[in-house]
Amino acid sequence: MANNFLTPDVIARQALATLYESLVMVPLVHTDHSREFTAQKVGNTVNVRKPAVFEAKDFNRATGIEIQSATEGQIPVVLDR
């Protein structure tokens, strides 16, 4: 039977798979817009969406629910690094 030596590539591939399975935060991060920023260069300005903020209020049976307006904003960010 021949010896089966592990190369650094095999070890790294298995370690990366194990690391990815044990991470908690990665599935929770929203990355749909990441393609918009990969084509940008240093010195460009990108607009980052700012989500709407809502206020938690107590429910009153007499008045019902109070509708809040959803206003999203944006913040310009200069890519300097």
Image (tube, rainbow, N blue to C red):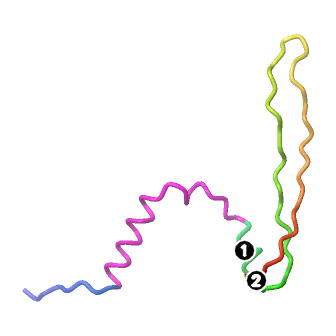
Q: Is residue 5 magenta?
A: no
Residue at 55% from the left image edge and 60% from the top image edge: 26
Q: Which three-letter amino acid code belongs to the residue tagged 1? A: Arg
Question: Is 58 placed left or right of 30 in the picture?
Answer: right
Q: Is the magenta region chiefly helix, strand or loop?
A: helix
Question: Is 75 placed left or right of 3 in the picture?
Answer: right
User: Which structural element holds mark 1?
Assistant: helix
Q: Is residue 10 magenta?
A: yes
Image coordinates of residue 41 in percent, x first then y, are 78, 86
Q: Which three-letter amino acid code belongs to the residue tagged 2? A: Ala
User: Which structural element holds mark 2?
Assistant: loop
Residue 66, quarter of picture: top right
Q: Is residue 60 above or below residue 31?
A: above
Mark seen at residue 39? 2
Image coordinates of residue 80 in percent, x first then y, are 78, 81
Rendered-image quadrant of the C terminus: bottom right
> What segment is highlighted magenta in the picture?
9-32
Residue 4, quarter of picture: bottom left
Q: Outermost residue, left direction?
A: 1
Mark seen at residue 35? 1
Image coordinates of residue 39 in percent, x first then y, are 76, 83
Q: Outermost residue, top direction?
A: 62
Residue 60, quarter of picture: top right
Number of numbered discs present?
A: 2
Question: Is 27 placed left or right of 5 in the picture?
Answer: right
Mark seen at residue 78? none
The answer to whether the residues at label 2 and label 1 have Cβ atoms under 8 Å apart is yes
Residue at 59% from the left image edge and 54% from the top image edge: 28
Pointer 2: residues within 10 angstroms few (<14), some, or many (20+)?
A: few
